[in-house]
Image (spheres, helix red, strand yellow):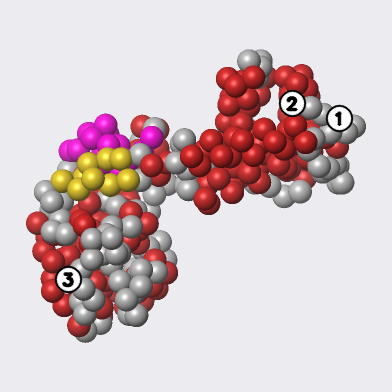
Amino acid sequence: MAGLDVQASEGQAASLARWLEYLSGVKGYSPRTIAGYATDVRRFLGFLAGYRGGAEGIAAMATISQTDLRAWMAYERDRGLGARSLARALSSVRSFMRWLAERDDMDATVILSAKGPKYLRKLPRPLSVDGAQEVIEDMGAAREGWIGARDLAVTTLLYACGLRISEALGLTGAAHPLPDVLRIKGKGGKERLVPVLPIAREAVAEYLRQSPWPLEREAPLFRGARGGALNPRLIARAMEEARLRLGLPATATPHALRHSFATHLLAAGGDLRSIQELLGHASLSTTQAYTAVDAARLMEVYAAAHPRA
């Protein structure tokens, strides 16, 4: 099926541009997310134009059939797209069509009801309680002075509050002193309230006491060596060095501290709805992945400890 990709019609391209503006301006999606949506939908429209013999207008989108969809998915598989990536692409197309249907009163039932390929979701890879503590302590001790205090403060926030690295590094001087409850703006501009443990508050305060840079309300809370915003790659690199020193697996990344936050809360009796709110997940199904992690750990303990296992 090679060579089917052609340009979408002007009408389709214009509608796509308006939808992307909607995602940015109204939904507050990140540039990276919007770029992914744009690529997926452009490829779909390009395939459709080639497959159906030429670019068509927006009205023709209502005539897309199951046969068209199956041909598109077969084409994407032939070019090497995996099941997970294809499911994401179909989700992008569904989102675009849902917006078109609401805006232009179009029947998009065929696409909205289409089932994507099945794939095994990757389970989160948390650290053990001891492993998380060892990493944080090692990060703080690896470098002397304010840099070590900074790395300790960042990783403590990731684990104690379940923040994404982008959320932690997105904090400004206005967040200090950290309150008992921190308001975090996460993916899609969605806000959530996160309790702040005293240990996290103290780690950030100690970093600021040692930092050579003045605290400014609108400036980044966490600074790089030259005073600019801290690059997340530096924290990732520091954690990589820490895990090598401690003999931890390659999955011990900054994001693994967020996974550890959720898994350890669940193991201690936290309920999924509360953990969902703390993590800022839009869907409970995303949070439910942690139940599979907990169940897998229980089975490992059972297999290792039961006399008849």
Q: Check whether the beta carbons of the residues at disc 2 and disc 3 lie within 8 A of each other.
A: no
Above or below: residue 205 compared with residue 100: below
Name the residue type under label 3: Leu
Name the residue type under label 1: Arg
User: Image quadrant for the N terminus?
Assistant: top right
For residue 281: magenta? Answer: yes
Question: Marks 2/3: CA distance?
Answer: 55 Å
First in sequence: mark 3 vs mark 1: 1
Above or below: residue 109 compared with residue 205: above
For residue 120: magenta? Answer: no
Question: Marks 1/2: CA distance?
Answer: 14 Å
Tell me: 297 left or right of 66. left
What residue sits 17% from the left and 71% below the top? 208
Above or below: residue 209 compared with residue 2: below
Query: Where does residue 186 sit, x and y in percent of width and height?
Result: 35, 45
Magenta extent: 269-282
What residue sits 61% from the left and 31% below the top? 96
- Badge 1 local density, few (<14 within 10 Å), some, or many (20+)? few
Question: Which residue in the structure is indicated by mark 2?
Answer: 58
Query: Where does residue 280 sit, x and y in percent of width and height?
Result: 32, 40
Between marks 1 and 2 in the image, the one whose residue lies nearer the viewer: 2
Question: Which residue in the structure is indicated by mark 3?
Answer: 208
Question: Which residue in the structure is indicated by mark 1?
Answer: 52
